[in-house]
Image (cartoon, grey):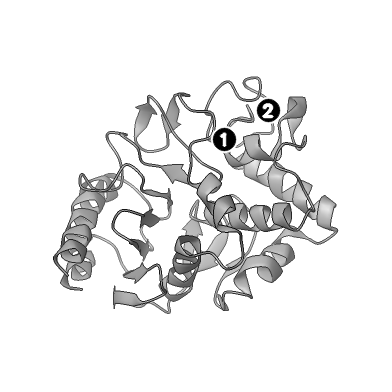
Amino acid sequence: MQSLALIQNWPVPSAAAGVVRADGTVVGTHGPVAQRFALASVTKPLTAYAALVAYEEGAVELDEPAGPEGSTVRHLLAHTSGLAFDEHRVMAPPGTRRLYSNAGFEVLADHIAKATDIPFAEYLRQAVLEPLGMTQTSLDGSPAKDGVSTVEDLLRFAAEVQAPRLLDARTVLDAMSVVHPGLSGILPGYGHQKPNDWGLGFEIRDSKSPHWTGSSSSPRTFGHFGQSGTFLWIDPDAGAACVALTDQAFGPWAVEAWPPFTDAVLGELRAR
């Protein structure tokens, strides 16, 4: 795909990108796709997927208490637990505000580790990474932000989310559907959004503006970006997903570069 070559213009030391269809067909790649990059918050969809495997295995229930003030697994996945961004401090009653929270994902992972009697990084490996052949991916710290992976591995994950084998398709549909509709909140890096819609571990584009995806991205687009200059989006209307990883911290360069890049990728997909 010629559009992927646009990453060569990004002001970053290193970047790699790829696009995959739901059937696992890699439409195109560019850059060092086998290079391992720090994912930052693109770790969260991997953690969420492992949590959903734990749910389907019966280890946890989505609506069981798992955090402070009775907040549930569902609340923690959807950033509605009331926990602060990076502190284990309650800022609001569960289900009342969309407070993006690394701490919430750490509480979630601890809950799953206790329920399964397996350290969470190992549970993630057994439940998601190993079955998908993601041999270059690891969780080296916080389940909210300390994943390391490659474009090759994340394309495998993006294909799985589009056509699930590890989970029931209905569970993934729930993950890409809005939890607690209508809640507003801060989208890190992009300011206050009303509404600030999220599913179970995945951010949902809807009508957010400004946004890190493209102007031509469908409202059903869902995914995540990371402060290490990384993103993964899945656009069901386009029938494809895109991964881009860099080693340059998110900043104004990304705000400027990512949307036209996504629009170029979608335009090329439509023309095929």
Of mark 1 and mark 2, the one earlier in the sequence is: 1
Where on the picture, by quarter, is residue 162?
Answer: bottom left
Secondary element type, mark 2: loop
Q: Which residue is mark 1?
A: 79
Identify the residue shown where x is 35% and y is 76%.
26
Where on the picture, by quarter, is residue 159?
Answer: bottom left
User: Which amino acid, by three-letter code, is at mark 1?
Assistant: His
What percent of the width, then of the height, locates residue 147? 56, 61
Residue 171 in sight here = yes
What percent of the width, then of the height, locates residue 248? 35, 58
Which quadrant: the N terminus? bottom left
Q: Which residue is mark 2?
A: 89
Identify the residue shown where x is 32% and y is 41%.
219
What percent of the width, then of the height, locates residue 87? 64, 34
Where on the picture, by quarter, is residue 268?
Answer: bottom left
Rendered view: 115 above or below 30: above
Instruction: Check disc 2: other Cα within 10 Å, few if <14, some if 14-19, many if 20+.
Output: few
